[in-house]
Amino acid sequence: MKRFKYGWILPASACAVLLLAAAGCEYDSPVPMFYQDHSARTGPSVTGLEPARAAAGVNTVTIRGERFSPAADSNRVYFNGAKTEIISATATSLLVRRPTVSGTLNLKVVNLGALEVGSFEGYPVDAVDASYGGFIDGAVNNAILVDAAENVYVFRTGLMKAFKVASDGTQSVFMEATIRGVTDVIPAADGTLVLLSNNAKISKVNPADGIETEWVAKAPKRFTVGAADANGNIYMAAKNTDLYMSYPDGTFSAALGVYATHDVKKIRVHGNYVYIIAEHATVEPKAAVYRHAILDASGTLGPRETVLDRAASGAFSAAAFKDVMFSASGDMYVATDAASPILQMKADGTLDTWYKGIIKGSAERLAAGNGRYAYMLQLDGAKGDLIRIDMGEGF
């Protein structure tokens, strides 16, 4: 091998060895993109969505098409740029959450194993929630009732006032001042509203004029929550009070003997049952929705049944259960303080998050209207608001 002024010259045999080595290295490296077969990398194709419109009451949407990844995490779905949760996937369908945005939306579907993006234009999605009644002053709402005419009564302890929101959404003052801070409001058999306020004195208010009068001078306990059955019996409780029943004449039953050491958060009557949300510091379940069958017109209750143990509620297992309401078909909705606060328990026992990513803030109270709407007292930080939720036809 000769050396010249500017370097060395390799013999021809050495050059051949280096070329063979380089050729061998090419086969050990990934095939460059420009050598790959792009026909095998074609992206997903979207042929349609079910239902054809995401109307109110639709909680999930199925995307039909081809070349999706059967591994849900290997797909991405966007409606007008907003990412949507994928619940399950096959090669030809994706089950996704209702979009968190509304309007006429454009869909993009990405399979992470493909180069191209699938698309679908013009999918209609209805808005399902809105601030209602003009509660913009930031005071906290504490109790809510919807009457047969779809008037919504909102009691605000911080202001010691009550407001009425008519069915057209206009707000008026219902009570200029309440005697005490109202924690729950219950329709009585005589057409008046019973006001509970963590006090042994219980008052009523006439919805026609907003005038409050004393009904019970001294109840057995200080009650904060209650609900009435079809016979006018009112079930009442609070923290460590047990469950009592008041009759239409203002007299009370003996304590039920079941909730003496529980913190009862809410009572609701649905069908032939009294439902109770209660917590306990040490006894399992530590938080649950219970129910008791109503056995007769006098309000005699059957034994306690556990409807939903919070520990078995999946994503809501660490949330505070605050209220409960029901649809006409028997689905149960639990108000919580989770980021997406409404837990749906379907009549068949399956659990889901209702309008996930759309309804936000702590749901302090829930109340079903007389048709398609429900009403939520929302607490977002220190601000209280009333939210009207379109639950869809058949709710």
Image: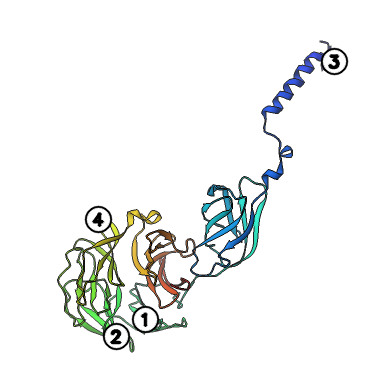
> What residue occupies the far top of the structure in this picture?
1
Instruction: Tell us which disc is closer to us: 4 or 1.
Output: 1
Where does label 1 land, which residue?
A: 147
Residue occupying the point 38% across, 57% down: 316
Q: Residue at x 20, y 79 (%)?
A: 247
Residue projecting furthest to the left: 254
**Numbered mark located on residue 5 in the image:** 3
Dot label at residue 191 = 2
Q: Tag 3, which secondary structure?
A: loop
Which element type, helix, strand or loop, lies under badge 1? Answer: loop
Look at 62% across and 45% down and name the residue there: 113
Badge 4 vs badge 2, beta-carbon distance below 8 Å? no
Task: Say whether disc 4 or disc 3 marks the residue closer to the N-terminus.
Answer: 3
Q: Secondary structure at mark 4?
A: loop
Q: Who is closer to the viewer here, 163 or 82?
A: 82
- Name which quarter of the figure residue 386 lies in: bottom left
